[in-house]
Image (cartoon, rainbow, N blue to C red):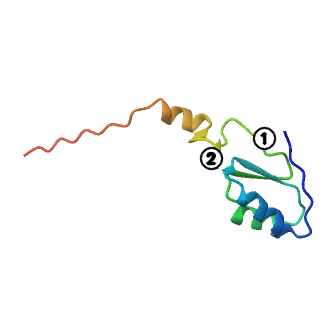
Amino acid sequence: MAVLSSFQRFEEALDQVNASRYGLQAGVFTRDLHRAQKAWDELEVGGVIIGDVPSWRVDHMPYGGVKDSGLGREGIRYAIEEMTEPRLLVIRSV
């Protein structure tokens, strides 16, 4: 599913994304580096993809969201952490 909306100002688009209760990933199509940085700074999402769709990913990327868009992250590092139990052993010798 895709939602297409038109906006007069770039800031309106950012506000609309942030108004959502979801925040998985965002795709921003721009050649303006300042707008790309502004999107990164302001969007309340798990990841910002500049120049491609938000479902683009590579296995080692920490793919996931914020707000009501899931719990945690996917990716190799996060899978290893999920399957690992951190433990601690302290031995104090006198």
Q: In which quarter of the view is residue 74 placed?
A: top right
Which badge, 2 or 1, is on the more N-terminal residue?
1
Crowd tier of the residue under label 2, counting other residues whose Cα lies within 10 Å: few below 14, some 14–19, many 20 or above? few
Dot 1 falls on a residue whose secondary structure is loop
Q: In which quarter of the view is residue 62 placed?
A: top right
Q: Is residue 46 left or right of residue 2?
A: left
Of 5 and 14, nearer the camera is: 5
Reply above or below: 17 against 1. Answer: below
Of 25 and 33, nearer the camera is: 25
Dot 2 falls on a residue whose secondary structure is loop
> Is there a contact, CB below 8 Å, between mark 2 and mark 1?
no
Determine which residue is flagged by label 1.
55
- Please name the residue shown 88% across and 70% down the image: 9
Q: Amino acid at mark 1?
A: Ser
Which labelled disc corresponds to residue 68? 2
Q: Amino acid at mark 2?
A: Asp
Q: Is residue 77 left or right of residue 15?
A: left
Q: In which quarter of the view is residue 87 placed?
A: top left
